[in-house]
Amino acid sequence: MIDPATNTPISIVGNAAESEIKGFEVELSALPVPDLILSTNIGYTDAEYTKVDPTAPITKNDKFPMTPEWTVTLSGQYEIPFRNLGNLIGRADYAYKTKIYYQPVNDPLSTQGGYGLLNSRLTFAHISDNWEVSVFGTNLTDKRHVITGLDGRSLGFALVQYARPREWGVSFRYSF
C-alpha cells in the first residue's frame, strides 16, 4: 500500500477478512498383485471469504493464496527380488494441482494455472538393508511452472519464480 501523503510504501497489519474452509482428503492404496502397490490421494478445498473489511485490498471473490481447489496424486511401486542380493524397486508418481494464486489479490501475474508433474525412481536396495543406490528423474515432462509470485507493480515490478526444470540424478545411501 502507498501512503498518499508521502507517496511511500507502508504496511498495515490487521484482519482483512473472515472465511470459511471446507474440504476433504481421500487416500487409497491397492495391492493388485504381489509386490505392486498402487496409490492415490485426492484432496478438495473449498475456501472462501465470507466477510471482507472494506479497506482491505481483497474482495469476497478472491481465492485464498497458495490453496489449489483440487490436488490429485497417483503413484505406483513395483519391487522385484534380485538374485538374493537385494531388491530392485521401481516407482513413478504423478501429482496434479488446479490453479494456484500466490497473492491475496488474485492478479494474473502471480497465478499458476493447473499443472501436473511426473517423477520416477529406480532403486537397488542391498539385502543387508545397509545401503541402496538410485537413479531418478524429476519433472520428467519438463513442465515450466511458477512456484511463487509477487505483484509489486505499485512499486514498479512484478516477480515470479519458476520451479526447477527436468532433472536426472543418482543417489547413494549408506546406514551404519
Image: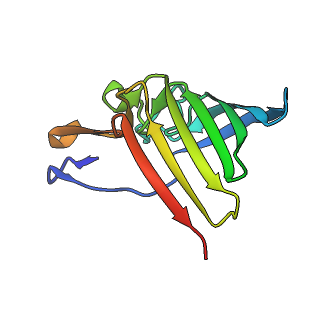
Residue 101's place in the image compared with 13, above or below, is above
Residue at (35%, 25%) from the top-left corner?
108
Numbered-mark total: 0
Q: How is the image coloured?
A: rainbow
Residue at x 43%, y 41% (from the top left corner): 55
Left or right of 140: which side holds 5?
Answer: left
- Front-most of residues 142 and 130: 130
- Which residue is nearer to you in this view: 67 or 85? 85
Give x and y (percent) for residue 79: 71, 40
Q: Is residue 112 left or right of residue 17?
A: left
Q: Give the residue drawn at x 60%, y 71%.
A: 175
Q: On screen, 18 above or below 133?
A: above
The answer to whether residue 119 is left or right of residue 142 is right
Q: Is residue 12 visible?
A: yes
Identify the residue at image location x=70%, y=46%: 83
Question: Is residue 50 something one can see in this rendering?
Answer: no
* Image position, residue 103 (x, y; %): 41, 39
When the figure is inspected, residue 16 is found, relative to residue 132, above or below; the finding is: above
Q: Which residue is nearer to you in this view: 147 or 142?
A: 142
Residue 52 is left or right of residue 27, and the answer is: left
The percent coordinates of residue 160 (x first, y second) are: 29, 38
Which part of the image, by quadrant, shows the C terminus? bottom right
Image quadrant in which you'd find residue 60: top right
Q: Nearer the viewer, residue 121 or 156?
A: 121
Question: Toward which corner of the image does residue 21 lie, by quadrant?
Answer: top right
Estimate the x, y position of residue 30 in percent, counting from the top left. Answer: 83, 31
Residue furthest to the front: 83
